[in-house]
Image (cartoon, rainbow, N blue to C red):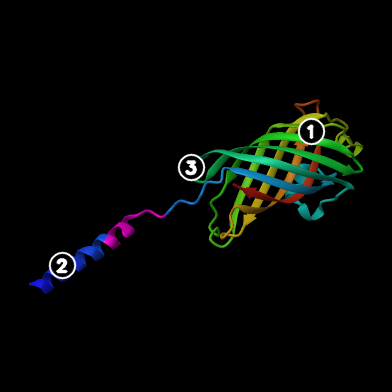
Amino acid sequence: MRLRLCRAALAFFLLSSVIPGLAAKPEAPPRRDNGVAILGGIFSPDVFSDIVFSPWDTRTDSIYILSGSYNRRLTTVLNHLDIEVEGGLGRRFGDNNSAEAYAALGLRWRQFPWNDFLTTSFAVYPIGPSYVANLSPAEVSKDGKSSNWLNYFSIELTLAAPSTPQLEMLFRLHHRSGVFGLINGSTNGADFLSVGARYRF
């Protein structure tokens, strides 16, 4: 009788210890809604569409940019699509010495089938103000018209190791233009091929 009671008590103890662990949901990873990044880029005299569709033919000029940015995720829809805002300050140097600033609304898709091996995201920043203090002749010569204030637009690819998703390497096509001539008749502005890194927290 005692042996049966001991066995029953032992079985009860094991079940009470194991079952809650089986029922518990895995801990969700931290959201890390904020990000800070630093980027360096080189100017291209080519138009945006040519850079996107034939990057192997992209030309570059001796205008460079170094910029820093702050990124904030506002919400997530469809489980994997982030809506975010970003603001940045930069300095052009080389053949154009000027300060530059921008702010933009962005959409970021995070779900890719290879994320267990290489955490990936793709973002588009379609709209926001872009300001350059001193316009370069190279920028104005793209279509003969430009403005200190234009629209900011960029596309971005980020890559990170799954073990450290908060550290992202990023590749960005940094673009400012007049939105098909809506701003000062400008159809082209400036394009910088940029690389950098972001820390999310």
Say whether residue 201 is left or right of residue 63. Answer: left
Kindly report the secondary structure that dominates the magenta region of the rendered protein: helix
Query: What residue occupies the far left of the structure in this picture?
Result: 1
Classify residue 123 by image quadrant. top right
Q: Mark 1 points at which residue?
A: 187
Q: Which amino acid does label 3 sit on?
A: Leu
Give the residues in magenta.
Answer: 17-26
Three-letter residue code for mark 1: Thr
In what element is the residue under mark 1?
A: loop
Secondary structure of the residue carrying numbered label 2: helix
Q: Answer whether residue 22 is magenta in the image.
A: yes
Counting residues from the N terminus, which is met first, the one under dot 1 or under dot 3?
A: 3
Residue 200 horizontal/vertical position (percent): 61, 48
Q: At 20% from the left edge and 67% from the top edge, which residue is drawn?
A: 11
Please give the residue where the numbered disc 2 appears in the rendered image: 8
Q: Residue at label 3?
A: 78
Q: Which amino acid does label 2 sit on?
A: Ala
